[in-house]
Image: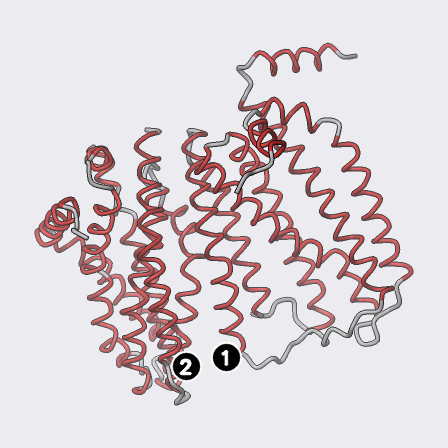
Amino acid sequence: MKIPGLFWGQFRRDGALALRQPGELANPLAFFVLVITLFPLGVSPESAVLAPLAAGVLWIAALLSTLLGLEGLFRRDRDEGTLEQLVLHGDPLVFAVLARLLVHWLGTGLPLTLLAPVLGAMLALPEEARWPVTAGLALGTPILVLLGGVGAALTVSLRSGGVLLALLVLPLFIPVLILGVSVAELAVAGLPTAPVLAWLGAGAALALVTAPFAIAGALSIAVETG
Amino acid sequence: MKVPAPLVRLWHRLGSPRWFFETTAPWLPWLLGLGVVLLGAGAFWGLALAPADYLQGNSFRIIYVHVPAAILAQSCYMLMGTCGVVLLVWRMKLADMVLEAAAPIGASFTALALITGAVWGKPTWGTWWAWDARVTSMLILLFLYLGIIGLRQALARPEAAGRACAILAIVGLVNIPIIKYSVDWWLTLHQPSTFKLTEKPAMPPSMWIPLLLSVLGFYALFVWSVLQSTRVVVLERERRTAWVQNFVTEQGSKP
């Protein structure tokens, strides 16, 4: 199958925009680091206290920083009318959505995953859990972006959809959180982590083939009904 | 596969809110009566006649509210997910109306199940709240309901709101088994089962028959309240049509 031009066009445009305004992508990451810094200050800097919490803290911070980046995902396109043009485009809207989400993940989920081993060390994450947790984040953050995209598309026409977006999206994030944290616990207990990672991978594959359609549907509803 | 003609006819008729409104009117007193009788019988039997549990004593009797509420909470979500599919595929107005009417009802059943569960948990588990798999997944279900209600209230145009809620209901429907299994799994892996309901003894009939009666009673009352609030939504949405205006004037002119 040939990938339509809409995908590549959107990918190049979003990539260029992201590279020219790196601040916008850096903010959720800074938020991620900041939330993680709060935990040793708020709970305890003792590594004995932090170690069992570390994986959970990493994941919750990842959830929250993903949520933070979602609100603007389609908002500007809708306000300036680009979204309307994308709906009218001959190629299916799904491809534009996929390109947008891919760029978004490359700009937020991927750096966040790459930071995780370092921040894990700062949180006294047990060494044997370091790479499994990172692998979990690599597989889990795409699910977060895809599911979050559904929420962002549903609330795109709202002036201030932030709180509602959190209410819609966070319950859907819960399975990812549970699986992601259980990877760490298995690793610490010396058990194989591959089965849970496989579940996360399956979730990512399922989200990848279904969520873009839900997002495209929600966006065209927003365009059709003004 | 050929669909039988009466079903096709029913399907087409369901496209008309007016047909729905007029057809369901005579059902309401029957459903209400059936629900009250079944629930009354179940409650009386369960609270007064059924024997006390050998471990939990009388505290188990809250089962006659708790279990039906929990079952209905999930059935209602299934109904909403189905309505979501029907709305998006066939654009049936009625599906959207049911979707709107059912959400608060489902949310209240979920809340009722959680509250009665907490009340039950205090004497049996020794705590109001435990992060048990079932409790947690019901809590998430409540959040899903609240999300759908919130989305509908936030979107001003009814058509946009209906279709957006339908998408959300379907996404939630897919997610419910995933949530359920992930939560089950999380628990079995990590949480030592300090608190556990006493292993269900094969209940004697004197205990489960009243439970069955109250579940059926809850169902009848659920259908009654969904119909009732769907009818209100029908009147609201179709208020510009002649038949609704006639209906309202007729109601108004009654003594």
Image quadrant occupied by the C terminus of chain B: top right
Q: Residue at x 35, y 53 (%)?
A: A210
Secondary structure found at label 2 = helix
**How far apart are the two marked residues, 1 and 2, measured between alpha carbons?**
9 Å
x then y, percent, for residue A34: 27, 66
Q: Check the image and name the residue furthest to the front.
A: B1
Answer above or below: position of B54 versus B29: below
What residue does disc 1 label? Answer: B189
Chain on which label 2 sits: A
x then y, percent, for residue B53: 83, 71
Answer above or below: position of B237 versus A9: above
Residue nearer the viewer, B187 or A3: A3
x then y, percent, for residue B80: 54, 44
What residue does disc 2 label? Answer: A185
x then y, percent, for residue A93: 25, 42
Q: Residue at x 78, y 52 (%)?
A: B214
